[in-house]
Image: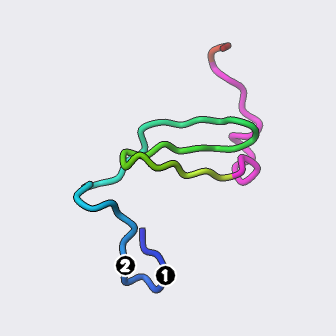
Amino acid sequence: MPIGNGSKRNRAAGSGDIRAVGLRFPSGRLIVERTDERDVSVPLRRYPTLQRARAAFPQ
């Protein structure tokens, strides 16, 4: 993913492709767990369809 002026890449050294390996939905947030051991977190309100969704399987 380009950052700044687009001339740099936000990629861990030697990691190859960075992919999502998990999702969590704690406290009104969407958290994507990545293969480079970092997480991306955004407010769930940015995705109203997900915010209104119910769990397919009761926990």
Q: Is residue 23 above or below residue 41?
A: above
Neighbour tally class for label 2: few under 14, some 14-19, many 20 plus, Cα within 10 Å? few
Q: Is residue 54 above or below residue 59?
A: below
Horizontal and vertical percent position of residue 38: 46, 50
At label 1, the amino acid type is Gly
Q: Name the residue under label 1.
A: 4
Q: In which quarter of the image is residue 29?
A: top right
Q: Is residue 51 magenta?
A: yes
Q: Name the residue under label 2.
A: 8
Residue found at x 42% / y 67%:
1
Q: Kindly report the distance in space between the C-alpha atoms of the residues bearing marks 1 and 2.
A: 7 Å
Q: Is residue 48 above or below residue 3?
A: above
At label 2, the amino acid type is Lys
Quadrant housing the C terminus: top right
In the displayed structure image, the side of residue 56 where residue 45 appears, left or right: right
Q: Is residue 6 above or below residue 47?
A: below
Q: Is residue 32 magenta?
A: no
Query: What range of the chain is rendered magenta?
Result: 43-56
Q: Nearer the viewer, residue 52 or 23?
A: 23
Residue found at x 51% / y 48%:
39
Horizontal and vertical percent position of residue 21: 42, 38
**CB atoms of marks 1 and 2 within 8 Å:** yes
Neighbour tally class for label 1: few under 14, some 14-19, many 20 plus, Cα within 10 Å? few
Describe the element under mark 2 as helix, strand or loop: strand
Residue found at x 72% / y 26%:
54
Which numbered disc covers residue 17? none
Describe the element under mark 1 as helix, strand or loop: loop
In the displayed structure image, the side of residue 36 where residue 53 appears, left or right: right
Horizontal and vertical percent position of residue 26: 69, 35
Q: Which of 41 and 37 is in front in this view?
A: 37
Residue found at x 43% / y 44%:
20
